[in-house]
């Protein structure tokens, strides 16, 4: 680790005052030639030497290590292990452990800075001190942790010595919070084979008989064909090919000006939580789900099912940022070009009102392609205001969504997402 002395502005005044007093006393001693004045000058000089040199010595021969998980969930409390080792023969006193942990304060939108992990009063010679620190992962994201370091201003507080380096660098991925959705009325897309006991949603159409087969554990008892079962003396069930099965298409708006609010109360954070939770619902019920968006780079995850597919979606949603310049209408136009008839397209609207008409034209194109719309409409003023809670204002986009027959979920800062999606 490299040693360095950092003198914060608030600590500049005290050393300057002490230096000034020392110079005045020395000047008086030179003119008066009195032993007492010389003694006072010597004490002040010694205090300056000790105040500046001792903090540096206290941090010499000390090493610090920090360990912890590399993955966590938003809102989870993680435990970091800290070890400070004294490789010198003499004890050390009043040493503070500091670290750069950007996820601390991220929920409030604070800029990353140093975090104090604890103050160690005494470290014996050739000894060590170990302790645990519990911290909350306030907001999802990809965080570069470290370097961890040490600081002290003991004994006089004239200056602060810091010791740090490039050790203890690590990465922490915080995954978005997922809230449970018990059920959500989804429409269906055609020509997607569906088997088993999952009931088609309302409006998805009827199912056509395909064949008979032997009963398997987990099959829906309602599908048992009793006449054939009685004739063959074994349970036989009917297989169906539905005219439609539910399918989700999550289309994100990752433009810079579409993300309003700070910290975990930004519209992008609400978008990520909703998209993650809907993807969880889809994968738990064997629904195909895909994801698209346009930030600095294009985001495109093809339709898939199962736990591995959900993990791929979650990994991406943990690290995305609203860093693009592409208008949402262009992203929606691209989605309309490859959407399936009957597919449910989930859209997120927090863009400035002046782009509402362009966006509505793209949404109309999706409807013309036979897609069903589930639109999350963010009320921008509530995210810009600290208190939130304002009523949803009527806008051309909101009224246009309703005219298109979209299922609209109005969203304000501080809304309970689980309540909104479990009506």
Image: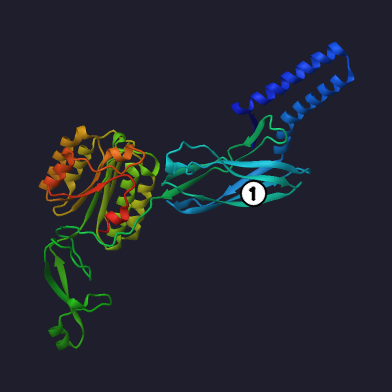
| Residue 326 in picture, x, y percent from top left | 26, 35
The answer to which of 333 and 16 lies nearer the viewer is 16
| Residue 271 in picture, x, y percent from top left | 31, 46
Which image quarter: residue 261?
A: top left
The answer to whether one can see residue 8 in this image is: no
Residue at x-position 30% and y-position 44%: 389
Which image quarter: residue 57?
A: top right
Quadrant in which the C terminus is drawn: bottom left
The answer to which of 92 and 22 lies nearer the viewer is 22
Residue at x-position 78% and y-position 25%: 44
176 vs 356: above or below: below
| Residue 42 in picture, x, y percent from top left | 83, 23
The secondary element bearing badge 1 is classed as strand
In the image, taking residue 178 as reference, residue 84 lies left or right, namely right
303 vs 50: above or below: below
The answer to whether one can see residue 307 in this image is: yes
Residue at x-position 36% and y-position 43%: 265
340 vs 207: above or below: above
Number of marks present in the image shown: 1
Q: Which residue is mark 1?
A: 83
In the image, taking residue 263 as reference, residue 348 lies left or right, namely left
Quadrant in which the N terminus is drawn: top right
In the image, taking residue 246 as reference, residue 414 lies left or right, namely right
Give the colouring mode of the picture: rainbow
Residue at x-position 67% and y-position 45%: 120
Furthest residue toward top = 31
Judge the density around disc 1: few (<14), some (14-19), many (≥20) Cα neighbours within 10 Å: some
| Residue 132 in picture, x, y percent from top left | 59, 52
């Amino acid at each position: 680790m490299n040693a360095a002395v950092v003198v914060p502005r608030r600590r500049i005044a005290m050393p300057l005052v002490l230096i000034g007093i020392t110079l005045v006393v020395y000047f008086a001693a030179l003119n008066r030639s009195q032993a007492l004045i010389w003694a006072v000058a010597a004490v002040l000089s010694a205090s300056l030497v000790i105040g500046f040199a001792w903090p540096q010595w206290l941090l010499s021969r000390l090493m610090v290590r920090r360990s912890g998980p590399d993955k966590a969930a938003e809102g989870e409390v993680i435990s970091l292990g800290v070890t400070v080792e004294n490789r010198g023969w003499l004890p050390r006193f009043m040493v503070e452990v500091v670290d750069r942990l950007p996820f601390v304060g991220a929920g409030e939108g604070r800029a990353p800075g140093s975090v104090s992990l604890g103050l160690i009063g005494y470290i014996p010679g050739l000894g060590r001190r170990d302790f645990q620190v519990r911290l909350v992962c306030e907001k999802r994201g990809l965080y570069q942790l470290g370097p961890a370091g040490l600081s002290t201003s003991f004994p006089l507080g004239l200056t602060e010595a810091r010791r740090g380096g490039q050790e203890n660098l690590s990465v922490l991925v915080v995954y978005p919070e997922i809230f449970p959705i018990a059920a959500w009325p989804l429409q269906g897309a055609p020509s997607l084979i569906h088997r088993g006991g999952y009931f088609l949603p309302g409006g998805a159409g009827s199912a056509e008989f395909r064949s008979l087969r032997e009963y398997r554990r987990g099959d829906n008892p309602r599908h048992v064909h009793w006449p054939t079962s009685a004739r063959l003396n074994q349970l036989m069930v009917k297989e169906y090919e539905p005219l439609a099965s539910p399918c989700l298409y999550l289309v994100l708006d990752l433009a810079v000006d579409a993300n309003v609010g700070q910290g975990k109360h930004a519209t992008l954070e609400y978008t990520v939580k909703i998209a993650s939770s809907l993807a969880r619902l889809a994968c738990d019920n064997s629904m195909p789900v895909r994801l698209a968006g346009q930030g600095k780079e294009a985001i495109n995850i093809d339709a898939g099912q199962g736990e591995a597919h959900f993990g791929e979606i979650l990994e991406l949603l943990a690290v995305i940022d609203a860093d693009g310049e592409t208008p949402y209408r262009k992203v929606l136009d691209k989605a309309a070009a490859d959407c399936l008839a009957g597919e449910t397209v989930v859209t997120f609207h927090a863009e400035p009102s002046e782009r509402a008409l362009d966006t509505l034209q793209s949404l109309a194109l999706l409807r013309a392609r036979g897609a069903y719309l589930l639109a999350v409409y963010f009320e921008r003023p509530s995210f810009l205001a600290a208190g939130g809670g304002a009523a949803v204002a009527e806008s051309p986009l909101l009224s246009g969504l309703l005219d298109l027959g979209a299922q609209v979920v109005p969203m304000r800062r501080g809304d309970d997402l689980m309540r909104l999606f479990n009506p």
